[in-house]
Image (tube, rainbow, N blue to C red):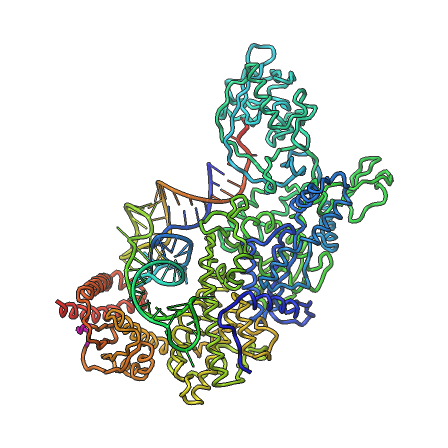
Amino acid sequence: MPHELPKAYEPGAIEAHWAEYWIKEKLFSVKTPPPGESRPVFTLLLPPPNVTGRLHMGHMLNQTQMDVLVRWHRMRGFLTLWLPGTDHAGIATQMMVERQLAKEGKKRRDMGREAFIERVWEWKRHYGGAILDQMKRLGASVDWDREYFTMDENLSHAVRDVFVRLYEEGLIYRGKYIVNWCPRCGTAISDLEVKHEDVQGKLYEIRYPVMGTNEFITVATTRPETMLGDTAVAVNEKDERYRHLHGKKVLLPLMNREIPIITDELANPEFGTGAVKVTPAHDPNDFQAGLRHNLPQIDVMDEHAHMNQNAGPYAGLDRHAAREQVVHDLRSQGLLVAEKDYTVPLGKCDRCGTVVEPRLSTQWFVKIAPLAKRAIEVVEAGEVTIIPENYSQIYLNWMNNIHDWCISRQLWWGHRIPAWRCAGCNEMMVAREAPSKCTKCASSQLEQDTDVLDTWFSSGLLPFTTLGWPQKTRDQEVFYPTTLLITAYEILFFWVARMIMFGCHFMDGHHQDPALKAASCWGGKKDDSVPFRRVYIHALVRDAERQKMSKTKGNVVDPIEVIEKYGTDATRFTLAAMSSPGTDIAFNPSRTDGYRAFANKIWNAARFMFMNLDRVAPGFTPGASGSETRTHTGIAGFEANSLEDRWILSRFNRVAQQVHESLDAYRFDNAATSIYDFFWGEFCDWYIELIKPRLADGADKETARIACGNLVRLFEASLRLLHPVMPFITEEIWQAIYDGKPPLKSIALACYPTADQHQVDLQAETDMAILQDLIVSVRNLRAELKVEQKLRVPIQVFAEDTAVRALIEHNQGAVERLANVQSIEFARGSLAKLPGARHTARFDVHVVYEKPIDVLAERARLAKELERIEKEIANGQRQLSNEQFLAKAPADVVEGLRRRAKELEVLRDKTKSKLDQLK
RNA sequence: AGGCCCGUAGCUCAGUUGGUUAGAGCGCUUCCUUGACACGGAAGAGGUCGAUGGUUCGAGUCCAUUCGGGCCUACCA
């Protein structure tokens, strides 16, 4: 049956089909292997996208890299598990649903907690799968049977368990502290969820009258409205200016409250006036100072950052209005000394951009130091490797300065904190399941804490909770620690650090199945509690102008649009090819356009192959890619008879080696470009052209059959080599090669090509390079002599080396065809001086064509060439006559330079004589 | 305040431990619709590697200084 491929490559049609096929056939589902499994294991946890999210370029890059590595490992025979899932994204999801409710004129509080949560679930069922659906379109080869959601019952159960354990170990505590508070979201947020931004503000200097004197003490502040909550003024003990005021009191303006002047290191004599107002309820430093001096904490704002009754006449104003009013009042009372321009670092809520308010409130915290200690050790000891390496320094730096983590959120959507308060005696009980009565007073009037946990608290547990923890499971023995985590720099602290802390803590004492650990080459690792062996931090995807993509700037590139325009394979290839370490990716669709052309090239090469296959060797299929041949290297069954056969086989094996080394080092860019250069620049541009005569109509049947067999085998192996990067087009053509009867369900299950050293043939590569050089020289001369494209011209060739001459003789037909040459005459002496001739160190070639050459242009070209040659000769001579160089440089470098020097001399003589000739 | 990254062809980027002639894609110029492919083929032009100094037999690569661009971390009002 003839193979029919449409003339032009249409990614849309084939991609949707195979994406669906892979899922339907459950090709990437992994059952828990029984004891005795001996394959190496590769486990990867998908960084769970938000249920609220849409796929963006960062995901696309991340998923491309993961899928490349996952498919690569799977094809290499690893037991490969890629675990997908989504994150409930507490604040973000709640915001989405509240916004939706607002359109219906409803409010969360009016609905009540239960009804609201039900509504969120409904929303989640409806929209929550967006990114995962998009992932399916990308061909991400995840195990869909193991898909998780952070609010699933089993994962929620694990979260409660973790909370209780940490509480019982004294690593979770509850207390009243200053936290970052978002007045819009109405919840506490962690340090990491605050984005700092330098904003042009004012530094206000305010006079406070010192009681019992006529003096004033002037304090400086950027937030005058908080003075309403001042409970002291601090000066530095060593500051002579204020020594006489120690122990005195000031009358707080506007509030007429007597507050003490205290001495505290909080006051820096170098800054402002050296005196600082102390507002323990509204500033973290002041809070600490307040504790040191036993100061009252007067909270002057409510949860929406409106002034409350403690703010006296200002009650009811929002914080911005209150500032204006306070400043106005101070000014009119003559107490405002100065307003200086000042750059203030303003903290904003990462989620909604509202200015964060440091707020005194009762929250739950994780005592982080003991957890951080282990997390630092495992990275320092290399139990977890962070790639690129400089990120581990950033990680350690952060870890060493870490603060306790506020984990409670005043939200409804999320894992509710498993703590109950007794209405009778106020006793706080933390338990896995709701207690029926108070452990202290036996009252049954118990209320569960209304707060939920930070979303990252649950995602930090995923490496083990997705594998069945807190049960001890076979899955954990096999798949934990996961092999690799690929993620964005932004969540190094949010997520990566927390997974390491939790993993080390809760999986302490865990051991991976020793046989599998050894098979996976992790035998040297001592610690199996870590959540992953390696972390690869990927680059940031920016727009073509290197701007960070953001919705507000409107420069967001939608990957789905790119995919629809150029195809998934081309988009994946772009991202892989641009994934070089250390640099962000400036995503430019023109690049993707180029890789779509690459896909088209592959497509048309396939059409060429099928055209010949159907004619020359109908029914032929390469039998060597099935699981039965997993161990073969190189290309099985390839009959390397001619130079081009030996050459391409050698090149293929070397490229396979390069790709292996590149992927092994996370050099997706090198892997992608190696394949690109091989397939287009060598396979299509040269090999296919060279074998055409053997396949042609009049050719010997047996020769044609062998050539065709080689072509198909080579093509099939190349598809396998490319498959991890371009899964769709490779699957389509691979399936077509087997004409509906493939040895495996998918190319994704075939084995990945590995290099066979016996198929590497350096002599063939050298010979081929000479031949290519000759052909390019002739083409070049033709262009210069303006020989009509179609006209076949005779050439003369001189080669001093008989081996070179023999090489050209043996491949005369190839030269004639590819350079459009009528005949080749072998000259007995140098042709270099002739007009219309070119020379290299190995041969001279002359195109016999009567049209005179452009003498001036030719002279200019030769002069330039001569200059370059002489410069290089001078360079080489300087080095070769330098004894230091001869003594210190490695032998192969010296040898190479000597060989080159000889060549250069030949070249110089030829070029010089020709130049003289043209005078 | 501290730390990190980048500066190579018009554009976007490679260039692994210093070693022979600094590469690719896109764009550009000229020619060609030849039976796989114009999303193609052939040939070509284009770079004193941000600047200065140093180490070295040898520097795009290492060191120092400097200029320009970006990012992150930080409780100094």
Q: Residue at x 60, y 39 (%)?
A: A349
Q: Tell me the quarter of the picture where residue A824 sits.
A: bottom left
Q: Which residues are magenta?
A: A831-835
User: Does A132 sit left or right of A766 as displayed?
Assistant: right
Magenta residue check for A565: no
Which quadrant of the figure has residue A684?
bottom left
Magenta highlight on residue A833 = yes
In this rendering, is residue A628 above or below A472?
below
Name the residue at the left extreme. Answer: A919
Along the horizontal axis of the image, is A240 left or right of B16?
Answer: right
- In-front residue for pair A177/A456: A456
Q: Is residue A471 depicted above or below A2 in this figure?
A: above
* Closer to us: B64 or A380: B64
Residue A352: horizontal and vertical position, in percent?
A: 61, 40
Residue visible at 32% across and 68% down in the picture? A892
Is residue A237 in view?
no
A716 sits left or right of A884 in the view: right
Whether residue A659 is visible, yes or no, is yes
Instruction: Name the spot of residue A368 as percent of width and height, x first.
Output: 63, 44
Quadrant for the C terminus of chain A, please. Answer: bottom left
Quadrant assignment for the N terminus of chain A = bottom right
Task: Locate residue A478, reporting x and y percent.
Answer: 66, 65
Q: How many marks?
A: 0
Residue B36 shown left or right of residue A88 in the figure: left
